[in-house]
Amino acid sequence: EEEDKKEEEDKERERTRKKRTSIASAGGEAEETHPAESLGASFRHFSLKHRKMDVNDMDALAFEREDAALRRRRALRQSSSAGVELNGKARDTGYFYATLTIGTPGRQYEVIVDTGSTYTFVTCYPCTSCGQHGTNAPYDAAKSSSYERVSCGSGCIIGSCRASGLCEYDEKFSEDSQISGHVVSDVIDVGGSLGAPRIHFGCNTLETNMLKTQRANGMIALGRHDASLHRQLKKKAYPPGSYDGTFGLCLGSFEGGGVLSLGKLPEQHYANFVTRKTHTSTVKLVKGSKSQYYNVEVVRMFVRDTELRRPSGAELIESFRKGYGTVLDSGTTYTYLHEDIFIPFISEIEDKVQNDHGATFFPVTGGDPNYPNDVCWRNLNENQPLSKDNINHMFPTFNLTFIGVNEEEISIEFPAENYLFMHPTELNAFCVGVFNNVHRGSIIGGIFARNTLFEFDDESALYIMHSNWIAHQTTRQLYK
């Protein structure tokens, strides 16, 4: 009887498969169902818009019997992705942020995009020492039906287990801000086919200094750590393996804005950007003294056609390795170079400006009295005032030589917009957004991503794509 029953079940599955194939051949539409559903499994359903699933030629049993390699190939075809619009600019907010929807019902939070941080956090309620953050309300667990308490028993991927029975954390930032709080779990809507998975994040109950006074009320962490947003999304992606953890960052120039891409977006979203690219370079990511950072190996630096050297005449390669090495950090707005690199860099920039323009470029003081050494100019020629439209032609380019994934040298040229910022108070004046980091190492900050797409492969590589396409236009293309 059992053999007869099994034979009848096999025949029923074959009739179902033929029916689906017949409908597809006739130009009709078969119902799109995940094969695992017929096995009685419970799955969270996200949009299939960007990951069409070919179920006409396979039944549930066949899906379960696929070997691992085939599953990986299918996952590539069924890749999950999302495009998140960024706002903010260097001059006004001093950072770039995304608006995420958290909880049920969803509430919006403005969170800074930071490739140098290890965990995502937002301001929480109640909190006796947190900022107002403009009109952004704090996260209130009592108002979200999807909130879940994260106790020590489930494992603290953030912070450590404390007497309260919760995973608690304390962290200080380089600008002397501090936060502390505990870990919670809730759904975060990142959009696209990644949907709204459940994520662990920090719930701040203490904030100081800049993190207390700024408008943004949180941070998206994209560092190299298991608690980072992209790594949690990688584990939660549906179907399994459909998101490989890669992400991209492209910022607008002086007008601000930009886009954060999670996964490989459908090709039509990149069409306008890619057709205007000048070159794509694949740079090797290396391990630095701090494992959460994205370190790169830089061997040379040029201002226009002049290679920079230390005062002793030595090459800069060892200087780029000093301290914590050379780090890419979107949460740091400007660029900070090790002193051995900064001194010849700023000297050569000043020399080139003097040689190119002479007395017509007049030095002006910076707009912040706390930083009296800022290097700024305005053009005395009233017929050609400095503007965001002409600074790439008026100021010298600079060039970094990276080590690629095949140990080759890769030379990438950056225009002036990747190191200048608009003077905060002086009309038609610009300042150099590169500063002395003394002996701590070198940080390539967010302005490097102006009109440049940085795609991060968390494991090994960084893809740098230059384009003359404006980032906020690229962002609009993402949502068409």
Image (cartoon, rainbow, N blue to C red):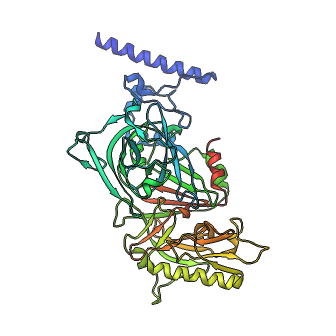
The structure residue drawn at horizontal position 55% and vertical position 75%, both measured from the top left corner, is 374
Task: Specify the quadrant of the image occupied by residue 457.
Answer: bottom left
Outermost residue to the left: 163
Q: Is residue 79 visible?
A: no
Looking at the picture, how far across and down is residue 456, in whole percent? 48, 56
**Figure quadrant of the C terminus:** top right
Q: Nearer the viewer, residue 189 or 271?
A: 189
Q: Does residue 435 lie above or below 134 as drawn?
A: below
Residue 94 rendering spot, x and y as whole percentages: 53, 59
In this orientation, does residue 315 appear? yes
In this picture, residue 431 sits left or right of residue 232: right
Q: Nearer the viewer, residue 425 or 202?
A: 425
Q: Is residue 330 left or right of residue 157?
A: right
Above or below residue 325? Residue 256 is above
Farthest top residue in view: 1
Instruction: Give residue 319's position: percent from left, percent from top.
Output: 42, 78
* 124 horizontally vs 346: left or right: left
Image quadrant in which the N terminus is located: top left
Question: Of all residues shown, which one is farthest toward the bottom?
Answer: 312
Residue closest to the far right: 383
- What residue sits 54% from the left and 79% below the top? 346
Q: Quadrant of residue 200?
A: top left
Identified at 68% across, 65% down, the residue is 388
Q: Position of residue 360 (x, y in %)?
A: 72, 81
What residue lies at 67% left-to-right and 55% top-to-bottom? 275
Of residues 162 and 289, the one nearer the viewer is: 162
